[in-house]
Image (cartoon, helix red, strand yellow):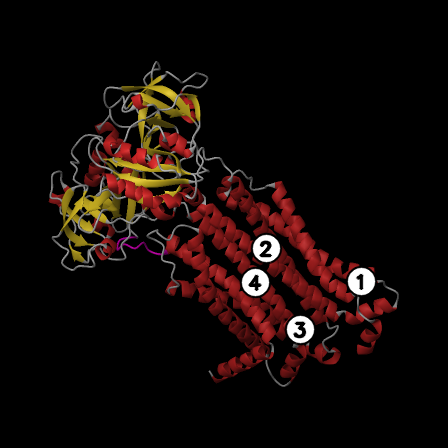
Amino acid sequence: MGTLLQDLRFGFRQLGRNPGFAVIAILTLALAIGANTAIFTVANDFLFRPLPFGNSDRVVMVKCQQRKIMQSGMATAGGWADQPSFKYWRDHNQVFQAMAAWAEEFEQHNLTGPEGPERVRAKQVTEGFFRVLGVTPILGRTFTVAEDQHGGNRVAVISHALWQTRYGSDPGILGNKLTLNGQSYEVIGVLPSNFRFSIASDDVWLPLQANLDEGPGGYYLHALGLLKPGVRLPQAQADMETLDVQLAKIFPQEWNSDQYVVVESLRDRYAKELRPSLLALLAFAGLVLLIACANLANLLLARAAGRQQEIAIRRALGAGRWQIVRQMLIESGLLGLAGGAVGVLVASYGVAVLYLLLPIASSPLARGGIDAPVLLFSLAISLLTVLLFGMAPALRAAGFDLNETLKQGLRGSRSMAGAQSSRAVLVAGEVALAAILLTAAGLLAKSFVRLSTVALGFQPESVLTVALHRPGQHMEHFYDPVLQRITALPQVRSAGIINFAPLSGGGWGQDIEIEGRPHSARGSIWAAHRQATAGYFRALGIPLLRGRAFEESDWWSDNAIVSEAMAKQYWRGENPIGKRFGVNCADSPCQWNTVVGVVGDVKELGPAAEPAVAMYFMEIGNEMTLAVRATEDPARLVGEIRQIVHSIDPNQPIGDVRTMESLAAESVAPQRLTMLVSVLFAALALVLAMVGLYGVISYSVAQRTHEFGVRVALGAGRRDILKLVVGQGSRMILVGVGAGILGALALARFVSSLLYGVKPADPPTFLAVTLLLIAVALLASYIPARRATKVDPLVALRYE
């Protein structure tokens, strides 16, 4: 321990004698370690950390999906099960300790009372839902079997946030009444503060009052299963597929041959779309760390070469090679730990930036704190960097020929030539890694530009959306005056109502039949069902391509407007105007509808998705979205819209106030994050690689001062010296760029899933990266080369 403390003191003194070197080394490491720590923090939240539920490692989702929906541009509409399917799964499975479900319908509710009207999210769940998740309320209890049945007591469990904000954390809240959609519910429990299940926070939880013994139809449920100890996903998948076959025999008329059952981790509910981006960013950050390590190894090799006389004298006085290696590694370790400490500080700000760039801060998985696992990760990569950038210089410092160094001095020794060769190899490796990162960043940037310019089928500029929930009958008596008064505002161009606004992630559809064609198998034809008013298409700028728009006479009629995708799919080569299609013909007598118009396609799930195959009816439902096109900033209309709504119904709140531009920006947020961070990493890699190249060439020029002086004295011109030095750098550049481009070609397929409209082996991108690297690298070589041309031969020879 005494020897170790002595080595530590000596290491601190050595770094203190070279503060410039220490600062550069620590900052280089801090940037690389900070980038890795920041990305790992977000990745840890979404990919590795246990979910914020007691049974997170055993909870899975069980859902039915339909190929027709997956192929129709409405992929997120799948993932449900009807009531008898869930009941059969729950009663006959062999792999789950318990099962529970929540209903897809009617999550938006109006909460009224003395505190004023408020729009809240209320999720309906079966008995045992919280037990499956492993969540215990901090006050009261959850639902019983009796409250789960149809006609049970009206009770509610509320979130911790609602308990705090609306009821002031009143410990006597149990037994109090709250009014949802005009109906009174008794509060029986309060959930813990750290419980979050949905990305959009759920405020109230209600018992799912449904009769699971009914036939197919009814509520659409999302099912959860708690795996038995020792059961894995493949086993659960096989068991549910067996039950799926049995269900098809039990309900042969109603069962959809197009559907299939899927068992997946609950984590996929939150992180499935982010996983490719986060894994790619972790890989990019790792490449930046390797480049930083190579750069610091270069610095340490140069420093070790400058200390050869010192080390030779220490060895001559009895120091062993292991003592020299240990001392050098301790100095590297001090740099690594200091860089790691500063890197954690950098990461704390970097995580905040990442969560700002990507709208995932509301996700139940988002925590963002630098906790113990993150600190252990930072410590691990700090120690790893010590080995990566410290071992080679330490071994070389302790391994040179002692007699040669003492006889010849520093200049011209064979060990110096070996160090120079090692540094050249490291620089070529840095350039190769930089080429890989630049290529990936170029592909992602080009992909994002193309994705951002994709036509969504509507004009999101200056459009405000406001969610409204209006239960009961004759809803048009509320919506009609709301639309009339909002349209009359001078700042409003047009206004309309739709049940699911584009890019909002919602939607439902129905099976259809085409008149005059053979009866198709149930589920083989499907279209998204949209309820809209006449002004909706004008408000969003969706063009009318054929036929006419909605008129007042179309209210609750059998007239429909269809999307261009639906017209092409079902009436290709025909005029769809006047054609008829039936809705849900397999379940009940066909409701035949006549096509009166065709509108442009809308990419409802984002620019990368297929346009929705959609049918529009002039109807109004319980949950609608108001779309308003303004002549100025639409956010300024929020106050007036709220006043208009409250003047018509004081108990009607508004919610989910968004602009379509913000929704459009969020639809490409994962791609934007991946692109921005990869470009940042690529720029950092380019700078580090060029600094390494500049350092090697500069050091070489300094060591060859005498040689350049002799060459100039013998008649060499400045162009000759320039060509000699730049040629030395060019060899490293060409080797590095060549290896990097080959590596990028080999690894491009790993980012192919993140690309849109760009091939992984995109020739313009590879050419641009090659030219950029060569140009910047030549500049980094030219600066020290120019200094070499100014060597005074008299000074050089006199110095020698």
Pointer 2 or 1: first along the chain: 2
Q: Is residue 726 above or below residue 105?
A: below
Label 2 – label 1 distance at C-alpha? 29 Å
Residue that label 1 marks: 721
- Whole-angstrom CA distance, mark 3 to mark 2, is 26 Å
Left/right placement of residue 275 relative to residue 744 reads left
Along the line of sight, which residue is nearer the eye, 500 or 114? 114
Is residue 399 in view from this perspective? no
Q: Amino acid at mark 3?
A: Ala
Instruction: Classify residue 170 by image quadrant.
Output: bottom left
Q: Which mark is residue 305?
A: 3
Residue 104, position in %: x, y? Answer: 26, 39
In the picture of the structure, the residue carrying the numbered disc 4 is 292
* SS for callout 2: helix
**Residue density around tag 4, few if under 14, some if 14–19, many if 20 or more, within 10 Å:** many
Among numbered discs 4 and 2, the one appearing first in the sequence: 4
* Vertical order, 16 against 487 (above or below): below
Q: Which residue is mark 2?
A: 433
Is residue 54 part of the magenta span, yes or no?
yes
- Mark found first going from the N terminus, 3 or 4: 4
Residue at x-position 41% and y-position 65%: 376
Other-residue count near label 2 (Cα within 10 Å), few / some / many at <14 / 14–19 / ≥20: many
